[in-house]
Image (cartoon, rainbow, N blue to C red):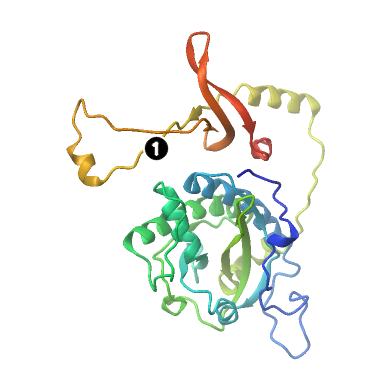
Amino acid sequence: MVNTPATPAPADRREKARRTAPAAHVPTLGATNLNPFGDLHAFEHLSTRMARSMRQVFEPLLRRAVRSWAEPVEVDRFAGFCAGRKGQGLTAWVPLALSSGGSPAILVIDGAFLLETLDLFFGGFGDVPNPLPSEFSPAAEAMLRRVARAIAQPLSEAWGPLAGVAFEAGNPEANPAMLAQIDGEDAVVATRFGIAAQDGRPTFIDILYPVAALKPHAPQLTTKVHGKTASPDPRWRSGLTRAVMTVKLPVRSVLAEPVVSLGVLLELKEGDVIPISFGPEVPVWVANRRLGTGTVGTANGQAAIKLISIDPGFEEDFQ
């Protein structure tokens, strides 16, 4: 599986749109306006930035290349969003506390995708129980907390310069009714991110922002986001480019990742042998980004790896 550009193919789009009236940012006479943030350009900009971060979060966990993209931003009541997910089975709901206070943002992850991630992370083939359980196991909950923390970090980095807001993952729930700090009638800004392997069906991750908690930041969120700025000084840009090109990045390859039980691990001693096996191709990573695949051999009397493929999108990650 390889990365592709962030823009998804038409088939990747969700089959059924979330329940939101057309032109939700335009108030209707006699109706309650759920959206005080206008055209939502700031949220679209933040979602585009977060989409790239989603790929960086899940590739190390899934141990494979994925592509990610941002869906259109929508505004709805929390009860309406929950109704749209009715019948989709086990779902993880994780509150993300805002440093500015108020109701938390809500991270929503499909339960089947989380269990697939858990199985792949521990060396499996992505097997998912059928039927899905009614609640998460301790191992699945631990993986859920890890994913939530990993998403909260780039989310804070994206929101920090704009509104000075940071996020912290809280205790996950399998039932949205257990989220005490948000009511069904509360309006939320719903952002959605698609994640998929090249040939796999996409899964969607939602982040819901309570409108009431973000109202203090309305001036920043209603400011127009400009795509272009004044051209920098050419000499400054040239010097910056030369400096960046001297940065050293670690390159590594994982030949094998054997799995042993805790009992075997505790009994290991010097001289014990752990059998490993690997195929003709091994993944090659630069920092925490997947570069591509290669074959193991020798060059000038030293062990080496010959690159046979480079993942599309690798250069995009470093631009």
- Mark 1 lies on residue: 257
Instruction: Tell me where residue 195 appears, x and y as whole percent.
Output: 60, 56
In the picture, measured across the screen, residue 207 lies left or right of residue 224, that is: left
In the picture, measured across the screen, residue 220 lies left or right of residue 116, that is: right
Q: Dividing the image into 4 quarters, which one contains the N terminus?
A: top right
Instruction: Tell me where residue 125 appears, x and y as whole percent.
Output: 46, 51
Q: Dividing the image into 4 quarters, which one contains the C terminus?
A: top right
Q: Residue at x 73, y 53 (%)?
A: 7
In the picture, measured across the screen, residue 10 lies left or right of residue 68, that is: right
Q: Residue at x 42, y 77 (%)?
A: 180
Disc 1 residue type?
Answer: Glu
Let me know if residue 162 appears in the view.
yes
Vertical relation: 107 (above or below) 58: below
Q: Decide which of 19, 253 is in the foreground and name it.
A: 253
Q: Residue at x 40, y 33 (%)?
A: 277
Secondary element at image label 1: loop
